[in-house]
Image: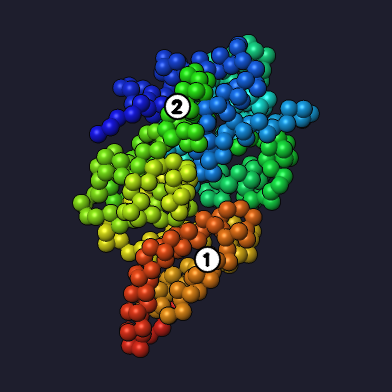
Amino acid sequence: MTTYEKILLKNMEQPGYTGSLADYEGTGGYRALRTVLKEMQPDQVIEVVKKSGLRGRGGAGFPTGVKWGFIPKNHPGPKYLCCNADESEPGTFKDRQLMERDPHQMLEGMAITCFAIGAQTAYIYIRGEFRLGAKILEQALHEANAAGYLGKNVLGSGLTINIFVHLGAGAYICGEETALLESLEGKRGMPRFKPPFPATHGLYQNPTVVNNVETMANVPHIINRGGEWFASIGSPPKSCGTRVFCLSGHVKRPGNYEAPMGITFRELIYELGGGMRSDKPLKAFIPGGASAPFLTPDHLDVKMDFESVALAGSMLGSGGVTVMEEGTNMVWAALRLMEFFYHESCGKCTPCREGTSWLVQTLQRIWNKRGRPEDIGVLDELCGNIPGRTVCAFGDAAVSPIVSTLLHWREEYEALIQEAQETMPRNKEIPVFSH
């Protein structure tokens, strides 16, 4: 099995490593922060991150350095950094490990980012269920403040950098950056219309950068080893560096695997993950969290980078790969995901609020063998009327399980409907859905 140099998971794989400040300093921790404060200007830091090719690891994949560069330099008021730790995407669990096992790596990245964009205040918006992670982060912040890495006069530089932990309330939509900002301001978590964008009108209508946990954790390594080093890893020029892939489902060795972007799904599932759990053939997999359309065994040799997965008809998204073996009913799989999206719709946009409800009703009717011949047409029509008609990308994500399963496994829908037609006269109609 091929082995790769680990960047983000390296420390925590060392025997006895606890993630404490002392342990982190022992691996060279906070050396990058010292470097930027003593030897670099903010623009130089941004330029290094641009050269690295680092793209956001939360799902959208926007170039990190470019996002930082959008922050206006002459803004008279405060600027903010928000670390998106609201890891609510089904099948995704990498940020949780990074926060719980090596919290200072992320905090150092946040401190460097604050220096680069001119922010004195940063928030970690963490998923409400991550109680242990929040507790560990609070302890790490206490250590970093006591050691002078955060707070007033950071390392004698005269700069102030304060970082605070903010627990969310369990809303999936708050993983969307503007809904996160609304929630952080004490409002109901609903996405904002864009433009204006957070870079100019973010938290409290001030310039704000929102970056994911894994993105922040990469920053100290890029400063220490150079943008060119990071850009040489993976699948340059557009998919650089390593990625922590979350592998789950019907595999023998589920877990987080850090590998260069550009390895194939076959290598992740069969080499790193040990293959299918019961040695049945692979039937389907989700390549980038629940929002990503399903792929088939024909896509096993697709490279795991942003461009290749997009060309295959899906997206790399959050890096959560969920594997399904032969025997899994794809109508059931689509229904389970649609029930999640229906439950998590914030309700702001009518197509999403009402459309997800009707999609769940229709799928439940088919799955419970009450389907009608026209139901597939109903699904097609509904899925065509939600994407592109919502404030955020939730509507596009919500229909992807149905669109992709209809594309690749339409016969499974038809078989259930055919069975319903054969048995319907002998069955009593029963309601299958309730709000």
Depicted 375 relative to depicted 33: above or below = below
Label 1 SS: helix
Label 2 SS: loop
Residue mark closest to the camera, 1 vs 2: 2
Q: In screen coordinates, is 108 left or right of 371?
A: right
Residue 120: which quarter of the image?
top right
Q: In the rendered structure, which disc, 1 or 2, sits on the residue that comes first in sequence?
A: 2
Which label was assigned to residue 232? 2
Which label was assigned to residue 383? 1
- Rendering coords of residue 202 (x, y %): 69, 40
Which amino acid type is shown beneath numbered disc 2? Ser
The answer for how far apart the CA atoms under marks 1 and 2 are is 40 Å
Q: Residue at x 57, y 53 (%)?
A: 393
Q: In screen coordinates, is 44 left or right of 423?
A: right
Towards the viewer: 27 or 245: 245
Please give the count of numbered marks on the rendered protein: 2
